[in-house]
């Protein structure tokens, strides 16, 4: 349980959920929608409101660092070591 909350993501999660989501966002960022008043294609992503950040959003998670231990994971491991004293039998 702790391990899975402490890594950035795993291969299955990335391929099944994160990668398709990121691809859709990139598609909407690049393609845009209908032409605006100045003849330029406007993004289908909102310009205002809670979702406006998607206009410039870039994922902090990339496939190369998927299973890297997160900063939170490092902190969790230190706490676990203090509690269980590194005893592998208690952790299995």
Image (cartoon, rainbow, N blue to C red):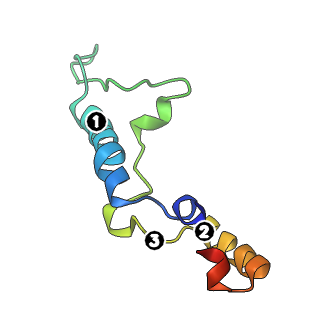
Residue 73 is labelled as 2
Mark 1 neighbour class, 10 Å CA radius: few under 14, some 14 to 19, many 20 or more: few
Residues at marks 1 and 3, CA–CA distance in whole angstroms = 24 Å
- 30 relative to 10 in the view: left or right: left
Q: Could you tell me how far apart the alpha carbons at marks 3 and 2 are, in whole angstroms?
A: 9 Å
Secondary-structure class at tag 1 = helix
Residue 50 screen position, x and y as percent? 56, 27
Up/down of 25 relative to 68, above or below: above
Question: In which quadrant of the rendered view does residue 71 lie?
Answer: bottom right
Labels 1 & 2 near each other (Cβ < 8 A): no
Q: Earlier in the sequence, mark 1 or mark 3?
A: 1
Residue ID for mark 1: 24
Please report contact status of discs 1 and 3: CB closer than 8 Å, yes or no. Answer: no
Which label was assigned to residue 68? 3
Viewer-nearest residue: 37 or 9:
9
Question: How many residues crowd around disc 2 within 10 Å: few (fewer than 14), some, or many (20 or more)?
Answer: some
Vertical side of 35 occupied by 62: above or below: below
- Which quadrant of the view contains residue 82? bottom right
Residue at image x 35%, y 43%? 17
Residue 62, percent from left and from top: 36, 60
Q: Earlier in the sequence, mark 3 or mark 2?
A: 3
């Amino acid at each position: 349980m702790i391990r899975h909350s402490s890594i950035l993501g795993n291969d299955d999660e990335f391929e099944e959920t994160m990668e398709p989501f990121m691809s859709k966002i990139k598609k909407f960022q690049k393609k845009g929608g209908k032409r605006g008043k100045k003849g330029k294609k406007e993004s289908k992503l909102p310009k205002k409101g809670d979702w406006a950040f998607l206009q410039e959003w870039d994922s902090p998670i990339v496939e190369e660092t998927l299973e890297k231990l997160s900063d939170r994971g490092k902190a969790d491991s230190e706490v676990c070591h203090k509690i269980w004293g590194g005893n592998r039998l208690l952790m299995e």
